[in-house]
Amino acid sequence: MRTLVILGHPNPDSYCAALARSYADSARQAGAHVDLLDLSSLHFDPHLHGGYHADQPLEPDLQRAQQLIRQADHLCLVTATWWSSMPALLKGFIDRVFLPGFAFRYRPGRMLPEQLLRGRSARVIVTTDTPPLLLRTLLGDPTLRSLSQGVLAFCGYRVRSTRLGPIRGSSDMQRAAWLDRTARLARQDHARRAARPALA
């Protein structure tokens, strides 16, 4: 089983990075082949110039990212909530990588597209400085909903999601507990995914 962990935070020394490493290490210990993709280390233009109507060749790092996504049975995406959204680097990565013909395909006369990444599972882990209950009830959980439903489920993933916060003002003990929880989620996700048929 192949697992791809994507760190969507632009700071490689962030708490999100620690969460991503915790998930990756735990999945690896559970028996998965794990790749960790740190978006801050990639070289690419995050702007999709012309939308889907202009040809914009993929940089080598994005070609490799698509290859890793295609190969992975399971994907874990770790990011933060900034201004009720995802960091711009992650948004640019999604715009450039999850393209028609790779992640989905429009079908004439059909309301919904063909899901080209169907059969895969995903875990989205989002940190926030807003208490998660407040984030859900007052703001509608925009980052998690956008990533889980608007991107991954749209492309065919079966998605599970996790909110962690508030990060600001949290103690070392609380942060250690969240790291432990993330490691447990990785083991659970691996066991759940391993019980299903592997990708062809």
Image: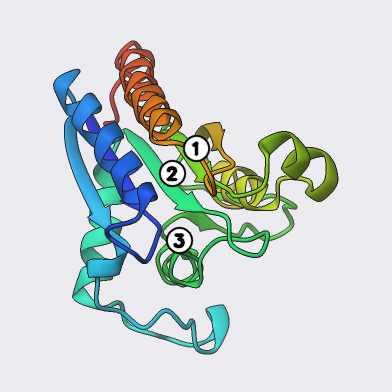
Disc 3 versus disc 2: distance between alpha carbons? 10 Å
Q: Nearer the viewer, residue 24 or 194?
A: 24
Mark 1–mark 3 CB contact (< 8 Å): no
Q: Dot 1: what SS?
A: loop
The residue positioned 32% from the left and 13% from the top of the image is 191
What's the amino acid at mark 2? Answer: Leu
Which mark is in front, 3 or 2?
A: 3
Disc 1 versus disc 3: distance between alpha carbons? 12 Å
Mark 2 burial class by Cα count in 10 Å: few <14, some 14-19, many 20+ = many
Q: Position of 20 compared to 50: left or right?
A: left
Residue 31, x across and y down, in percent: 15, 20
Q: Which colour scheme is used?
A: rainbow
Q: Using the image, determine if residue 115 lies above or below residue 11.
A: above
Q: Which of 41 and 82 is in front in this view?
A: 82
Mark 3 or 2, nearer chain start: 3
* Residue at the farthest right position: 138
Specify the label residue 117 is tagged with: 2
Mark 1 or 2, nearer chain start: 2
Mark 3 burial class by Cα count in 10 Å: few <14, some 14-19, many 20+ = some
Residue 81: quarter of image: bottom right
Can residue 41 be seen here? Answer: yes
Q: Name the residue under label 3.
A: 98
Mark 1–mark 2 CB contact (< 8 Å): yes
Mark 3–mark 2 CB contact (< 8 Å): no
Residue 177, x across and y down, in percent: 40, 25
Q: Name the residue under label 1.
A: 157
